[in-house]
Image (tube, rainbow, N blue to C red):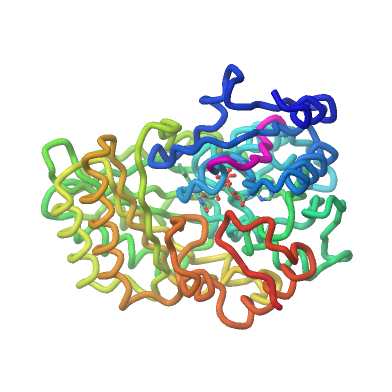
């Protein structure tokens, strides 16, 4: 072990893991099994001071850096070959101030950590739909989930942050202090510093009416149209997502996942119940935490390659084409995910956040998933071709939270729009002028 590494171990409150240490293979693993990288050192931080020490060590030793929250980003930006990982997985505390309706979440907390803490007080913020996804990583890219129509994007509820910038400074961002930085953090990704603590606005909510509705057979195109028409009416009390996938017998099926928070007879759900091909209606009243457990994919099992497009509409011809392309994939478990952006995201003044997709109608994501490396080429080609077929309907460069590492800068730029991208480049020049934090959907500093 080098003298430098021994000194680093002494300097941090957390743990330092090198390739020869037990647990190395476990802590370098990310959600996407397509990504298999071997960092030189992983610093499992315990707080902002450790993050500053890790930045300092990387700079002194000429090491490139990656930042790990929940490890979910499909591009695998949280791990790198030969460099240093600032790992936040030991910083998962979430404190709730029920009177102020604010949660303060450490930089490595997951949605499971967050929802458990906030639901103990009957409070929520609109977050991601999988418990092991990182709260901060998701928020920094926007955040779409089961409560988007009711309360907006996750980043719209992100009201403050404390971050360590690459020069080791501790900076605060809020509506009162460095408000332009808060704007950039609402969508601009991990470009400006490591967020060690984030503050989120909370809303009272315990029960929802939700679950999965499964449609099979030739009627699924009609059911997908019914879903589209339902959300086009912009119900404020129902978020709704849908996905198309393949059964083991290679038949396309549709799942619609409403999350309804209105009162009364659940009339809003009637069009989904009347749609053709409904074989299982799993929608019922349950806890919000129950809704958050509808999807629990295995961590690090599948190889994944995703591409998303924000579209202005889902015309019939696109629906038919997507179902045909799903069938053509010929191998489960890949899927086409359709997330609706109706409701509260449209109420927010767009100038308060850097996200560039607020005005889109749906986020349509092509998500190949497979186990066998022999299928890499075929699955990646299917994703690219299907995504190209969606492109004519697209209104922006895609969702940064679902981007692979091979996306060209033009798509990252288009994801924000020219003006916002320029604003982000200016912030980058101020907080990370040397582009130390470049393993992300990168915003190069303005020169
Ligand atoms: C199974 C699955 C489910 C998902 N569900 C949703 C969903 O419901 N809604 C949605 O909008 N998105 C969803 N996503 C996408 C997800 O939000 C993004 O991939 C996000 O980047 C993941 O954050 P992470 O911390 O888990 O990932 P990581 O790979 O650990 O981090 C990704 C990047 O985010 C940045 N980052 C993370 N934490 C910090 C921090 N504390 N400070 C500074 N930068 C940081 C870094 O640049 C890091 O490289 C999902 C992804 C997966 C794989």
119 left or right of 336 in image: right
Residue at horizontal 49 percent and vertical 66 percent from the top? 342
Residue 304 screen position, x and y as percent: 36, 45
- Observer-nearest of 387 and 98: 387
**Height in image: 55 above or below 421?**
above
Residue drawn 70% across the image and 30% down it: 90
Q: Which residues are magenta?
A: 81-90
Q: Residue furthest top?
A: 22
Quick one: quadrant of the N terminus?
A: top right
Left or right, residue 345 beside residue 429: left
Where residue 382 appears, x then y in whole percent?
A: 23, 56
Q: Is residue 136 above or below residue 391?
A: above
Q: Secondary structure of the magenta portion, mostly?
A: loop
**Does 325 appear above or below 379?**
below
Q: Quadrant of residue 374?
A: top left
Q: Nearer the viewer, residue 34 or 41?
A: 41
- Where on the picture, by quarter, is residue 193? bottom right
Q: Position of residue 434 (x, y in %)?
A: 72, 63
Vertical position of residue 315 compared to residue 240: above or below: below
Confirm whether the magenta stretch covers residue 89: yes
Q: Residue furthest front?
A: 2
Name the residue at 48% across, 64% down. 341
Residue 434 falls within the magenta-colored stretch: no
Question: Relative to 285, is 374 on the left or the right?
Answer: left
Please name the residue shown 32% across and 73% down the image.
Answer: 391
Can you see residue 103?
no
Residue 313 visible at all: yes
Number of numbered labels in the structure image: 0
Nearest the viewer among 57 and 198 is: 57
In x, y percent, where is residue 429?
75, 70
Q: Quadrant of the C terminus?
A: bottom right
Q: Is residue 267 left or right of residue 216?
A: right
């Amino acid at each position: 072990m080098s003298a430098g590494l021994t000194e680093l171990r002494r300097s941090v409150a957390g743990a330092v893991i090198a390739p020869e240490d037990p647990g190395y293979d476990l802590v370098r693993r990310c959600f996407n099994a397509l990504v298999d990288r071997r960092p030189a050192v992983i610093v499992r931080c315990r707080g902002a001071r450790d993050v500053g020490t890790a930045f300092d060590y990387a700079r002194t030793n000429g090491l490139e850096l990656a930042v790990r929250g929940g490890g979910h980003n499909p591009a695998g930006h949280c791990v790198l070959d030969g460099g240093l990982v600032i790992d936040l997985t030991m910083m998962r505390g979430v404190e709730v101030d029920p009177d102020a309706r604010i949660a303060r979440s450490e930089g490595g907390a997951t949605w499971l950590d967050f929802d458990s803490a906030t639901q103990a007080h009957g409070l929520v913020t609109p977050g991601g739909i999988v418990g092991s996804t990182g709260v901060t990583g998701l928020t920094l890219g926007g955040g779409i989930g089961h409560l988007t129509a009711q309360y907006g994007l996750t980043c719209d509820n992100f009201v403050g942050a404390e971050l360590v910038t690459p020069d080791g400074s501790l900076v605060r961002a809020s509506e009162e202090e460095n408000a332009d930085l808060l704007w950039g953090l609402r969508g601009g990704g991990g470009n400006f510093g490591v967020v060690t603590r984030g503050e989120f606005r909370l809303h009272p909510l315990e029960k929802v009416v939700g679950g999965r509705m499964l449609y099979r057979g030739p009627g699924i195109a009609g059911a997908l149209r019914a879903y589209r028409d339902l959300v086009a009416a912009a119900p404020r009390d129902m978020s709704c997502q849908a996905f198309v996938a393949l059964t083991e017998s290679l038949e396309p099926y549709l799942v619609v996942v409403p999350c309804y928070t209105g009162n009364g007879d659940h009339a809003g759900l009637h069009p989904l119940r009347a749609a053709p091909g409904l074989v299982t209606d799993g929608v019922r009243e349950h806890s919000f935490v129950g809704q958050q457990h509808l999807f629990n994919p295995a961590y690090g099992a599948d190889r994944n390659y995703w591409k998303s497009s924000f579209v202005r509409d889902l015309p019939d011809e696109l629906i038919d084409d997507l179902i045909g392309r799903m069938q053509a994939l010929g191998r489960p478990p890949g899927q086409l995910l359709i997330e609706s952006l109706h409701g509260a995201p449209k109420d927010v003044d767009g100038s308060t956040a850097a996200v560039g997709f607020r005005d889109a109608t749906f986020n349509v994501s092509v998500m190949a998933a497979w186990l066998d490396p022999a299928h890499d080429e075929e699955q990646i080609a299917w994703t690219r071709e299907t995504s190209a077929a969606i492109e004519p309907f697209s209104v922006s460069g895609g969702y940064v939270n679902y981007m692979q590492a091979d996306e060209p800068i033009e798509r990252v730029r288009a994801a924000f729009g020219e003006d916002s991208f320029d604003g982000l480049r200016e912030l980058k020049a101020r907080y990370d002028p040397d582009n130390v934090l470049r393993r992300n959907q990168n915003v190069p500093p303005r020169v």
